[in-house]
Amino acid sequence: MMRNIFYLKLVYRLGLVVCGWMLAAPLTVTGQDPQFSQFYAAPLYLNPAFAGSTQQGRVGINYRNQWPAIDANFTTISAFADFYIEDKNSGIGALLTRDYVGIVGLQSISLAFQYAYQLKLTQGLSFRPGVQVGIYNRSINFGRLTFGDQFDPRTGDIVQGTAEGLNTGQSKFFPDLSFGGLFFSKNAWLGIAAYHLTQPNQSILGAEDKLNMKLSFHAGWKFFFRPGVLGDGVFARPRERSIAPVMQYREQGLFRQADVGLYYTFEPLIIGTWYRGIPFRQVNGFANNESLVLLVGLTMKGEKDILNIGYSYDYTISKLGPGSGGAHEFSLVYSWPTRNPRKPPKDKLVIPCPDF
Protein backbone atom coordinates (compact mmCIF):
# COMPACT_ATOMS: atom_id res chain seq x y z
CA MET A 1 0.00 0.00 0.00
CA MET A 2 2.79 2.41 0.95
CA ARG A 3 4.63 1.62 -2.27
CA ASN A 4 1.49 2.40 -4.28
CA ILE A 5 1.15 5.75 -2.52
CA PHE A 6 4.78 6.54 -3.31
CA TYR A 7 4.41 5.76 -6.99
CA LEU A 8 1.21 7.77 -7.25
CA LYS A 9 2.93 10.77 -5.68
CA LEU A 10 5.98 10.34 -7.87
CA VAL A 11 3.95 10.19 -11.07
CA TYR A 12 1.99 13.27 -10.01
CA ARG A 13 5.13 15.26 -9.15
CA LEU A 14 6.91 14.22 -12.34
CA GLY A 15 3.84 15.41 -14.22
CA LEU A 16 4.31 18.82 -12.65
CA VAL A 17 7.95 18.83 -13.73
CA VAL A 18 7.02 18.05 -17.33
CA CYS A 19 4.38 20.78 -17.29
CA GLY A 20 6.91 23.23 -15.94
CA TRP A 21 9.45 22.51 -18.64
CA MET A 22 6.77 22.65 -21.34
CA LEU A 23 5.83 26.12 -20.17
CA ALA A 24 9.37 27.43 -19.75
CA ALA A 25 11.47 25.72 -22.40
CA PRO A 26 11.43 26.37 -26.16
CA LEU A 27 9.61 23.19 -27.18
CA THR A 28 7.05 22.93 -29.97
CA VAL A 29 4.22 23.78 -27.61
CA THR A 30 1.65 26.40 -28.52
CA GLY A 31 0.05 28.83 -26.12
CA GLN A 32 -2.02 31.96 -26.22
CA ASP A 33 -2.48 35.23 -24.45
CA PRO A 34 -4.86 35.28 -21.48
CA GLN A 35 -8.47 36.03 -22.31
CA PHE A 36 -11.36 37.79 -20.61
CA SER A 37 -14.96 36.66 -20.93
CA GLN A 38 -16.08 40.25 -20.29
CA PHE A 39 -14.00 41.44 -23.21
CA TYR A 40 -15.83 44.77 -23.57
CA ALA A 41 -15.18 45.49 -19.88
CA ALA A 42 -11.48 45.24 -20.78
CA PRO A 43 -11.57 47.49 -23.87
CA LEU A 44 -7.90 48.48 -24.00
CA TYR A 45 -6.91 44.81 -23.71
CA LEU A 46 -9.26 43.96 -26.58
CA ASN A 47 -8.10 46.65 -29.01
CA PRO A 48 -5.85 49.73 -28.65
CA ALA A 49 -8.34 51.62 -30.85
CA PHE A 50 -10.64 51.75 -27.80
CA ALA A 51 -8.29 54.20 -26.01
CA GLY A 52 -10.39 57.27 -25.20
CA SER A 53 -13.47 55.73 -26.85
CA THR A 54 -15.93 56.96 -24.20
CA GLN A 55 -14.77 60.55 -24.85
CA GLN A 56 -14.34 60.78 -21.08
CA GLY A 57 -11.80 59.79 -18.47
CA ARG A 58 -11.98 56.11 -17.53
CA VAL A 59 -10.27 53.67 -15.17
CA GLY A 60 -10.97 49.99 -14.74
CA ILE A 61 -9.82 46.69 -13.32
CA ASN A 62 -10.51 43.12 -14.45
CA TYR A 63 -9.86 39.91 -12.52
CA ARG A 64 -10.19 36.35 -13.83
CA ASN A 65 -9.67 33.05 -11.98
CA GLN A 66 -9.81 30.09 -14.37
CA TRP A 67 -10.11 26.45 -13.22
CA PRO A 68 -9.85 27.25 -9.48
CA ALA A 69 -10.64 23.65 -8.49
CA ILE A 70 -7.46 22.16 -10.01
CA ASP A 71 -3.73 22.80 -9.59
CA ALA A 72 -3.26 24.00 -13.17
CA ASN A 73 -5.29 27.15 -12.60
CA PHE A 74 -4.72 30.56 -14.17
CA THR A 75 -5.28 33.96 -12.59
CA THR A 76 -5.22 37.16 -14.62
CA ILE A 77 -5.57 40.72 -13.41
CA SER A 78 -5.54 43.80 -15.60
CA ALA A 79 -5.84 47.50 -14.79
CA PHE A 80 -6.24 50.33 -17.28
CA ALA A 81 -6.79 54.06 -17.61
CA ASP A 82 -7.61 56.11 -20.69
CA PHE A 83 -8.54 59.68 -21.54
CA TYR A 84 -9.93 61.56 -24.51
CA ILE A 85 -8.22 64.72 -25.80
CA GLU A 86 -11.06 66.53 -27.51
CA ASP A 87 -9.01 69.25 -29.24
CA LYS A 88 -6.83 66.58 -30.88
CA ASN A 89 -9.60 64.03 -31.59
CA SER A 90 -7.28 61.60 -29.78
CA GLY A 91 -7.35 59.06 -27.01
CA ILE A 92 -4.46 57.89 -24.84
CA GLY A 93 -4.32 54.93 -22.51
CA ALA A 94 -2.17 52.74 -20.27
CA LEU A 95 -2.64 49.04 -19.57
CA LEU A 96 -1.01 46.86 -16.90
CA THR A 97 -1.60 43.08 -17.01
CA ARG A 98 -0.38 40.19 -14.87
CA ASP A 99 -1.00 36.54 -15.78
CA TYR A 100 -0.01 33.76 -13.37
CA VAL A 101 -0.01 29.96 -13.75
CA GLY A 102 -0.27 28.48 -10.27
CA ILE A 103 1.10 25.01 -11.03
CA VAL A 104 4.66 26.19 -11.73
CA GLY A 105 4.65 29.87 -10.80
CA LEU A 106 4.98 30.99 -14.42
CA GLN A 107 4.28 34.72 -14.50
CA SER A 108 3.91 37.25 -17.29
CA ILE A 109 3.66 41.00 -16.59
CA SER A 110 3.14 43.61 -19.29
CA LEU A 111 2.92 47.39 -19.32
CA ALA A 112 1.60 49.05 -22.46
CA PHE A 113 0.78 52.57 -23.66
CA GLN A 114 -1.79 53.29 -26.34
CA TYR A 115 -2.80 56.04 -28.71
CA ALA A 116 -5.92 56.23 -30.90
CA TYR A 117 -7.26 58.86 -33.29
CA GLN A 118 -10.95 59.38 -34.06
CA LEU A 119 -11.63 60.07 -37.74
CA LYS A 120 -15.06 60.98 -39.12
CA LEU A 121 -15.57 59.18 -42.45
CA THR A 122 -19.19 60.15 -43.14
CA GLN A 123 -22.06 61.66 -41.18
CA GLY A 124 -22.90 58.29 -39.68
CA LEU A 125 -19.59 56.39 -39.80
CA SER A 126 -16.31 56.89 -37.92
CA PHE A 127 -12.98 55.07 -37.76
CA ARG A 128 -10.47 54.85 -34.93
CA PRO A 129 -6.95 53.53 -35.68
CA GLY A 130 -4.86 52.69 -32.62
CA VAL A 131 -1.31 51.68 -31.72
CA GLN A 132 0.15 50.03 -28.63
CA VAL A 133 3.78 49.91 -27.49
CA GLY A 134 4.57 47.72 -24.51
CA ILE A 135 7.16 45.78 -22.58
CA TYR A 136 6.82 42.27 -21.14
CA ASN A 137 8.53 40.45 -18.30
CA ARG A 138 8.23 36.67 -18.15
CA SER A 139 9.52 34.68 -15.17
CA ILE A 140 9.14 31.31 -13.48
CA ASN A 141 9.49 30.03 -9.93
CA PHE A 142 11.04 26.55 -10.12
CA GLY A 143 10.83 26.41 -6.33
CA ARG A 144 7.19 25.33 -6.70
CA LEU A 145 8.26 22.07 -8.37
CA THR A 146 9.29 18.84 -6.64
CA PHE A 147 11.60 16.13 -7.99
CA GLY A 148 12.20 12.44 -7.39
CA ASP A 149 15.26 12.95 -5.18
CA GLN A 150 13.15 14.85 -2.63
CA PHE A 151 10.94 11.89 -1.67
CA ASP A 152 11.43 9.35 1.12
CA PRO A 153 11.24 5.96 -0.70
CA ARG A 154 9.56 4.34 2.31
CA THR A 155 6.75 6.83 2.89
CA GLY A 156 6.55 8.89 -0.29
CA ASP A 157 6.82 12.10 1.74
CA ILE A 158 9.01 15.04 0.74
CA VAL A 159 11.93 15.06 3.19
CA GLN A 160 14.71 17.09 1.54
CA GLY A 161 15.63 19.63 -1.11
CA THR A 162 16.49 18.73 -4.68
CA ALA A 163 19.92 18.52 -6.27
CA GLU A 164 18.50 19.75 -9.58
CA GLY A 165 20.36 22.87 -10.67
CA LEU A 166 17.50 25.16 -11.63
CA ASN A 167 17.72 28.92 -11.35
CA THR A 168 14.38 30.07 -9.96
CA GLY A 169 15.23 33.70 -10.59
CA GLN A 170 15.31 33.46 -14.37
CA SER A 171 13.25 36.05 -16.25
CA LYS A 172 13.02 37.67 -19.66
CA PHE A 173 12.20 41.24 -20.75
CA PHE A 174 11.13 42.00 -24.31
CA PRO A 175 9.36 44.85 -26.15
CA ASP A 176 6.11 44.46 -28.06
CA LEU A 177 4.20 46.32 -30.79
CA SER A 178 0.49 46.06 -31.68
CA PHE A 179 -2.05 47.85 -33.86
CA GLY A 180 -5.84 47.99 -34.05
CA GLY A 181 -8.68 49.61 -35.93
CA LEU A 182 -12.36 50.16 -35.21
CA PHE A 183 -15.23 51.16 -37.52
CA PHE A 184 -18.47 52.20 -35.84
CA SER A 185 -21.80 53.88 -36.40
CA LYS A 186 -24.68 54.75 -34.07
CA ASN A 187 -25.81 51.12 -33.91
CA ALA A 188 -22.93 48.90 -35.04
CA TRP A 189 -19.17 48.35 -34.74
CA LEU A 190 -16.46 46.24 -36.35
CA GLY A 191 -12.92 45.99 -35.00
CA ILE A 192 -9.67 44.20 -35.70
CA ALA A 193 -6.48 44.08 -33.66
CA ALA A 194 -3.08 42.54 -34.38
CA TYR A 195 -0.83 41.92 -31.36
CA HIS A 196 2.88 40.95 -31.12
CA LEU A 197 3.66 42.06 -34.68
CA THR A 198 7.40 41.64 -34.13
CA GLN A 199 6.91 38.13 -32.64
CA PRO A 200 9.50 38.69 -29.90
CA ASN A 201 11.54 35.87 -28.39
CA GLN A 202 9.92 35.03 -25.03
CA SER A 203 12.12 32.11 -23.96
CA ILE A 204 13.27 32.31 -20.35
CA LEU A 205 16.04 29.76 -20.90
CA GLY A 206 17.82 31.64 -23.69
CA ALA A 207 16.74 29.62 -26.73
CA GLU A 208 14.35 30.61 -29.53
CA ASP A 209 10.65 30.71 -28.60
CA LYS A 210 8.72 33.35 -30.53
CA LEU A 211 5.53 34.83 -29.16
CA ASN A 212 3.03 34.20 -31.94
CA MET A 213 1.11 37.10 -33.42
CA LYS A 214 -2.51 37.28 -32.24
CA LEU A 215 -5.36 38.44 -34.47
CA SER A 216 -8.67 39.49 -33.00
CA PHE A 217 -11.94 40.35 -34.76
CA HIS A 218 -14.94 41.72 -32.88
CA ALA A 219 -18.28 43.04 -34.04
CA GLY A 220 -21.83 43.66 -32.94
CA TRP A 221 -25.09 45.44 -33.53
CA LYS A 222 -27.20 47.14 -30.89
CA PHE A 223 -30.98 47.30 -31.30
CA PHE A 224 -32.40 50.15 -29.24
CA PHE A 225 -35.93 50.09 -27.84
CA ARG A 226 -37.95 52.89 -26.32
CA PRO A 227 -35.92 54.05 -23.30
CA GLY A 228 -37.21 53.75 -19.79
CA VAL A 229 -37.35 56.56 -17.27
CA LEU A 230 -35.95 56.69 -13.76
CA GLY A 231 -37.13 59.46 -11.44
CA ASP A 232 -39.82 62.11 -11.81
CA GLY A 233 -40.00 65.66 -13.12
CA VAL A 234 -36.69 67.47 -13.39
CA PHE A 235 -35.00 64.43 -11.82
CA ALA A 236 -36.16 62.09 -14.59
CA ARG A 237 -33.36 60.32 -16.44
CA PRO A 238 -33.63 58.07 -19.53
CA ARG A 239 -32.61 54.46 -19.06
CA GLU A 240 -31.37 52.36 -21.97
CA ARG A 241 -33.38 49.37 -23.22
CA SER A 242 -31.58 47.35 -25.90
CA ILE A 243 -30.46 43.97 -27.21
CA ALA A 244 -26.99 43.55 -28.72
CA PRO A 245 -25.80 40.38 -30.51
CA VAL A 246 -21.99 40.28 -30.48
CA MET A 247 -19.12 38.11 -31.65
CA GLN A 248 -15.37 37.84 -31.15
CA TYR A 249 -12.90 35.66 -33.03
CA ARG A 250 -9.21 35.31 -32.26
CA GLU A 251 -6.32 33.19 -33.44
CA GLN A 252 -2.74 32.84 -32.23
CA GLY A 253 -0.42 30.18 -33.58
CA LEU A 254 -2.48 26.98 -33.74
CA PHE A 255 -5.04 28.38 -31.31
CA ARG A 256 -8.50 29.34 -32.66
CA GLN A 257 -11.45 30.48 -30.58
CA ALA A 258 -14.74 32.34 -31.00
CA ASP A 259 -17.36 33.93 -28.74
CA VAL A 260 -20.94 34.37 -29.94
CA GLY A 261 -23.62 35.78 -27.69
CA LEU A 262 -26.15 38.37 -26.68
CA TYR A 263 -26.39 41.29 -24.23
CA TYR A 264 -29.71 42.49 -22.87
CA THR A 265 -29.66 45.96 -21.31
CA PHE A 266 -32.46 47.04 -18.99
CA GLU A 267 -30.72 49.79 -17.06
CA PRO A 268 -29.43 49.62 -14.45
CA LEU A 269 -29.27 45.83 -15.10
CA ILE A 270 -27.33 44.14 -17.91
CA ILE A 271 -27.54 40.40 -18.57
CA GLY A 272 -25.37 38.57 -21.07
CA THR A 273 -24.86 35.02 -22.25
CA TRP A 274 -22.62 33.57 -24.95
CA TYR A 275 -20.96 30.43 -26.20
CA ARG A 276 -17.19 30.02 -26.52
CA GLY A 277 -15.77 27.52 -28.95
CA ILE A 278 -15.74 26.43 -32.59
CA PRO A 279 -17.75 23.17 -32.64
CA PHE A 280 -16.83 22.19 -36.21
CA ARG A 281 -13.08 22.50 -35.48
CA GLN A 282 -11.39 19.44 -33.98
CA VAL A 283 -8.67 19.78 -31.34
CA ASN A 284 -6.78 16.53 -30.66
CA GLY A 285 -9.78 14.58 -31.92
CA PHE A 286 -12.36 16.45 -29.81
CA ALA A 287 -14.86 19.14 -30.77
CA ASN A 288 -13.69 22.61 -29.78
CA ASN A 289 -16.40 23.36 -27.22
CA GLU A 290 -15.03 25.33 -24.28
CA SER A 291 -17.70 27.00 -22.18
CA LEU A 292 -21.02 28.75 -21.77
CA VAL A 293 -20.71 32.19 -20.18
CA LEU A 294 -23.30 33.94 -18.03
CA LEU A 295 -22.96 37.60 -17.05
CA VAL A 296 -24.75 39.91 -14.62
CA GLY A 297 -23.80 43.58 -14.72
CA LEU A 298 -24.92 46.72 -12.95
CA THR A 299 -24.48 50.20 -14.39
CA MET A 300 -24.96 53.16 -12.07
CA LYS A 301 -25.16 56.57 -13.72
CA GLY A 302 -24.76 59.77 -11.76
CA GLU A 303 -25.22 63.30 -13.02
CA LYS A 304 -22.25 62.87 -15.37
CA ASP A 305 -20.19 59.88 -14.19
CA ILE A 306 -20.81 56.14 -14.64
CA LEU A 307 -19.84 53.11 -12.56
CA ASN A 308 -20.08 49.61 -14.07
CA ILE A 309 -19.76 46.44 -11.98
CA GLY A 310 -19.84 43.00 -13.58
CA TYR A 311 -19.57 39.32 -12.65
CA SER A 312 -19.46 36.41 -15.09
CA TYR A 313 -19.08 32.65 -14.78
CA ASP A 314 -17.73 30.28 -17.42
CA TYR A 315 -19.46 26.89 -17.23
CA THR A 316 -16.96 24.45 -18.74
CA ILE A 317 -18.41 22.15 -21.42
CA SER A 318 -15.08 20.81 -22.72
CA LYS A 319 -13.65 17.41 -21.77
CA LEU A 320 -12.13 19.09 -18.72
CA GLY A 321 -15.67 19.29 -17.34
CA PRO A 322 -17.37 21.50 -14.72
CA GLY A 323 -15.28 19.86 -11.99
CA SER A 324 -12.48 22.26 -12.96
CA GLY A 325 -14.45 25.05 -11.32
CA GLY A 326 -15.01 26.92 -14.57
CA ALA A 327 -13.89 30.53 -14.43
CA HIS A 328 -14.95 33.46 -12.28
CA GLU A 329 -14.49 36.98 -13.56
CA PHE A 330 -15.07 40.40 -12.02
CA SER A 331 -14.90 43.84 -13.59
CA LEU A 332 -15.09 47.38 -12.20
CA VAL A 333 -15.01 50.39 -14.56
CA TYR A 334 -15.55 54.05 -13.66
CA SER A 335 -15.77 56.93 -16.15
CA TRP A 336 -16.24 60.67 -15.70
CA PRO A 337 -16.34 63.78 -17.93
CA THR A 338 -13.06 65.55 -18.68
CA ARG A 339 -14.05 68.07 -21.36
CA ASN A 340 -14.31 71.79 -20.77
CA PRO A 341 -18.04 72.46 -20.10
CA ARG A 342 -17.73 76.03 -21.40
CA LYS A 343 -16.87 74.81 -24.90
CA PRO A 344 -19.64 73.55 -27.19
CA PRO A 345 -19.34 69.76 -27.72
CA LYS A 346 -18.22 68.50 -31.09
CA ASP A 347 -20.55 66.37 -33.18
CA LYS A 348 -19.02 62.95 -32.58
CA LEU A 349 -20.33 59.41 -32.63
CA VAL A 350 -19.97 57.25 -29.52
CA ILE A 351 -19.23 53.55 -29.94
CA PRO A 352 -22.44 51.65 -29.06
CA CYS A 353 -20.77 48.41 -27.87
CA PRO A 354 -21.74 46.99 -24.44
CA ASP A 355 -19.86 47.95 -21.29
CA PHE A 356 -19.22 44.31 -20.36
Image (cartoon, rainbow, N blue to C red):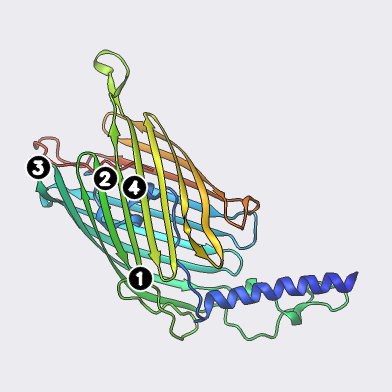
SS of the residue at dot 2? strand
Circle 4 residue: 59
Q: Tell me if 225 is positioned left or right of 15 in this view.
A: left
Spatial distance from mark 1 to mark 2, Cα to Cα?
30 Å
Quadrant for the N terminus in the image = bottom right
Circle 3 residue: 123
The answer to whether mark 2 and mark 4 are in CB contact below 8 A is yes
Spatial distance from mark 1 to mark 4, Cα to Cα?
27 Å
Circle 1 residue: 213
Three-letter code for the amino acid on which mark 1 is drawn: Met
Spatial distance from mark 4 to mark 3, Cα to Cα?
30 Å
Q: Counting other residues with Cα less than 10 Å from the Cα at mark 3, is it few (<14), some (14-19), or many (20 or more)?
A: few
Label whose residue precedes the other's in the sequence (4 or 3): 4
Three-letter code for the amino acid on which mark 3 is drawn: Gln
Res 286 → quadrant: bottom right
- Residue at point 38%, 29% (across, down): 268
Q: Nearer the viewer, mark 1 or mark 2?
A: 1
Circle 2 residue: 57
Image spot of residue 180 (x, y percent): 26, 60
- Residue at point 71%, 78% (across, down): 147
Label whose residue precedes the other's in the sequence (1 or 4): 4
Spatial distance from mark 3 to mark 2, Cα to Cα?
25 Å
Three-letter code for the amino acid on which mark 2 is drawn: Gly
Three-letter code for the amino acid on which mark 4 is drawn: Val
